[in-house]
């Protein structure tokens, strides 16, 4: 899929590119959003990686933005925040700063530290994240029910992580004989991942 996507970087026709991406998604049994995400992360389609958020197609919201939104919503300390921290894993976060901040939040949860209090600020400062805490805290919370938005955004992050795993195993699948036991095992694992993603 990555080899095919590199071809798209050479076209200046956005309509043709959109159609081709849709076809690639069908051939590989993936969602179009997954293909666009892969293209953006790998910078195979530079415009998806560099366009401002306002001009980027909706389905290509960057993973980092989703991660930051999850962290911001968790800071609201609503009932869903604890559940979100317990269900998430550090591997769900791709940006290093987001991974570090998640670990601070999760550590505070385990220690029953109020995220809105001075003790939490001190924990962030000890890890050099006081500036990042202020940055995350300055993100505007979208209108609507915070818990619903948090749960939906957590699901999106989990789907992205599973999508990454599917892509990794798809690459492994291409590197082994198609009729080998390993290929069969990889195909079965990919199917399980796709099922898990569909059930989120």
Image (cartoon, rainbow, N blue to C red):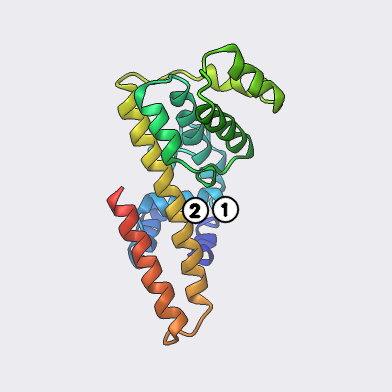
Mark seen at residue 24: none
Distance of label 2 from label 1 (alpha carbons): 6 Å
Please say if the residues under marks 2 and 1 sit with CB atoms less than 8 Å apart: yes
Residue found at the very far bottom of the displayed protein: 179
Q: Is residue 15 above or below residue 187?
A: above
User: In screen coordinates, is 127 left or right of 177?
Assistant: right
Q: Is residue 125 above or below residue 70?
A: above
Residue 59 can be seen, yes or no? no
Residue ID at (51%, 18%): 114
Where residue 42 sits: x, y (%)? 57, 53
For numbered disc 1, what is the local secondary structure? loop
Between 130 and 41, the one lying in front of the other is 130
Between 56 and 95, the one lying in front of the other is 95
Residue ID at (47%, 49%): 37
Q: Badge 1 is on which residue?
A: 42
Q: Is residue 55 above or below residue 4?
A: above
Residue 124, quarter of the rendered image = top right
Where residue 20 sits: x, y (%)? 39, 59
Residue ID at (49%, 53%): 38
Residue 62 can be seen, yes or no? yes
Where residue 192 sits: x, y (%)? 35, 64
Q: Badge 2 is on which residue?
A: 38
């Amino acid at each position: 899929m990555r080899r095919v996507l590199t071809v798209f970087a050479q076209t200046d026709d956005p309509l043709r590119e959109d159609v081709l991406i849709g076809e690639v998604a069908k051939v590989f049994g993936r969602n179009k959003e997954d293909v666009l995400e892969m293209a953006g992360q790998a910078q195979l389609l530079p415009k998806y990686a560099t366009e401002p958020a306002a001009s980027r197609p909706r389905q290509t919201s960057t993973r980092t933005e989703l991660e930051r939104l999850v962290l911001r919503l968790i800071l609201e300390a609503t009932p869903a925040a604890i559940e979100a921290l317990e269900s998430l894993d550090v591997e769900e976060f791709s940006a290093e700063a987001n991974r570090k901040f998640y670990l601070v939040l999760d550590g505070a949860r385990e220690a029953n530290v109020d995220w809105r209090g001075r003790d939490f600020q001190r924990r962030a400062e000890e890890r050099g994240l006081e500036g990042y805490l202020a940055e995350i805290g300055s993100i505007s919370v979208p209108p609507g029910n915070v818990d619903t938005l948090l749960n939906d955004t957590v699901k999106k992050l989990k789907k992205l992580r599973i999508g990454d795993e599917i892509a990794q195993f798809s690459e492994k699948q291409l590197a082994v004989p198609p009729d080998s036991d390993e290929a069969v095992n990889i195909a079965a694992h990919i199917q399980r991942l796709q099922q898990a993603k569909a059930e989120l």
